[in-house]
Image (cartoon, rainbow, N blue to C red):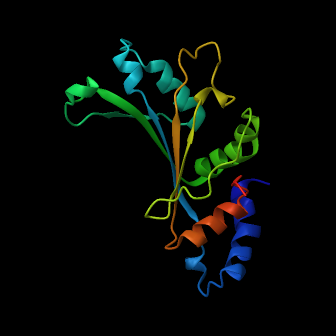
Amino acid sequence: MSLKEKYKKEISPKLKKDLECKNSMTIPKIEKVVLNMWIGTYIRSGNKDFSSLTNHLALIAWQAPIVKKARKSISNFKLRAWMPVGLMVTLRWDRMYDFLDKLIHIVLPRVRDFRWINKKSFDKNWNYNFWIKEHSIFLEVPHDDVIQNHWIQITVKTNTSDVEKSRALLKEMWFPFSK
């Protein structure tokens, strides 16, 4: 059973009962998942071609990333305006649920010395943010092509107005939170 089907059949009714939601529209749900990969150090090291990183993120997320560029120059960081600094992918609907299913059940358990993810990483909008140190832990990335490992920031945006509701939703989806 996919994560989307499980959400509709099991998680949503359980959350409605546990959180005492009177309206089915107030049940917490995930709106989107955003993946960010910062490539500024890769560019500053002299590599102008970051197409391999773009291909890796496209393989991970099943869609092409957007190249984010610097808005202004900062001389201390050797950063010039309009220099590429990151790659971003926004996942919604079926791809979002498929990615989360793969992340929770396949990718995170493969990490050596995995210490769980922090349950306090919610921002002021009640979205959950966490980092993965090596993008090469995903099965889709060919290990022969990896020159340098890059961090990936994963943001899970929910529609809730309370951190407890967001935490309950992610806990029901089997996010491996620390105890």
Residue 95 appears left or right of 105: left
Toward the viewer: 108 or 115?
115
Relative image position of residue 71 (x, y in whole percent): 22, 37
120 in relation to 25, above or below:
above
Quarter assignment of residue 171: bottom right
Toward the viewer: 161 or 7?
161
Q: Quadrant of the C terminus?
A: bottom right
Relative image position of residue 97 (x, y in whole percent): 64, 52
**Residue drawn at x 60%, y 75% as measured from the top left:** 27
**Residue drawn at x 65%, y 80% as measured from the top left:** 19
Quarter assignment of residue 17: bottom right
- The answer to whether residue 28 is visible is no
Q: How many marks?
A: 0
Q: Quadrant of the N terminus?
A: bottom right
Toward the viewer: 8 or 88?
88
**Residue drawn at x 72%, y 76% as measured from the top left:** 13
155 in relation to 37, above or below:
below
71 in relation to 140, above or below:
below
Q: Residue furthest bottom?
A: 22
Relative image position of residue 131 (x, y in whole percent): 55, 41
**Residue drawn at x 46%, y 59% as measured from the top left:** 123
Quarter assignment of residue 137: top right
Relative image position of residue 134 (x, y in whole percent): 59, 29
- The answer to whether residue 33 is visible is yes
